[in-house]
Amino acid sequence: MFLIGKPYDAFPHDRGNGQMVAFLAQHRSVVIDADQTALAHGGTSEGSPGLKTEYHAHYFGAYLRDPDSNKLCVACHTPEG
């Protein structure tokens, strides 16, 4: 999924601000693994893996920036277990 919208932080639209690429994970462990892999390869955290209940009860996601400052999300929408 590729999202373009009004930047959440009210700063001007720029690379990784007002746009994001999101990847759907089948399991929460994939979100954690993707986060760890991204950080090990020069990415930076924009939100550690965890429940983000402001979206819905089972939203488990991580937010990152790649080395070029593009914003990425990896999320799982299924309940644990």
Image: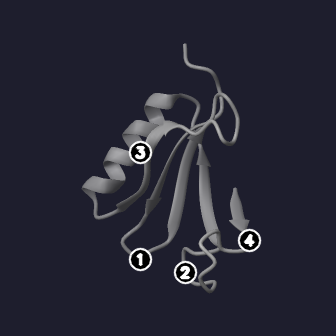
Instruction: Classify 15 as above or below 60.
Output: below
Q: Are marks 2 and 1 in contact (CB under 8 Å)?
A: yes
Q: Are marks 2 and 3 in contact (CB under 8 Å)?
A: no
Secondary structure beneath dot 2 equals: loop
Q: Which mark is residue 15?
A: 2
**Nearest to viewer (mark 1 / mark 4):** 4
Indicate the amino acid at tag 1.
Asp
Q: Quadrant of the N terminus?
A: bottom right
Q: Distance between the Cα atoms at labels 2 and 3? A: 21 Å
Badge 2 or badge 4: first in the primary sequence:
4
Q: Which residue is mark 1?
A: 68
Horizontal side of 48 relative to 27 (left or right) equals: left
Indicate the amino acid at tag 4.
Gly
Q: Are marks 1 and 4 in contact (CB under 8 Å)?
A: no
**Nearest to viewer (mark 3 / mark 4):** 4
Crowding at dot 2, Cα within 10 Å, few <14 / some 14-19 / many 20+, comes out as: few
Instruction: Classify 13 as above or below 73.
Output: below
Badge 2 or badge 3: first in the primary sequence:
2
Q: Which residue is mark 3?
A: 34
Crowding at dot 1, Cα within 10 Å, few <14 / some 14-19 / many 20+, comes out as: few
Instruction: Classify 78 as above or below 23.
Output: above
Badge 1 or badge 4: first in the primary sequence:
4
Badge 1 or badge 3: first in the primary sequence:
3
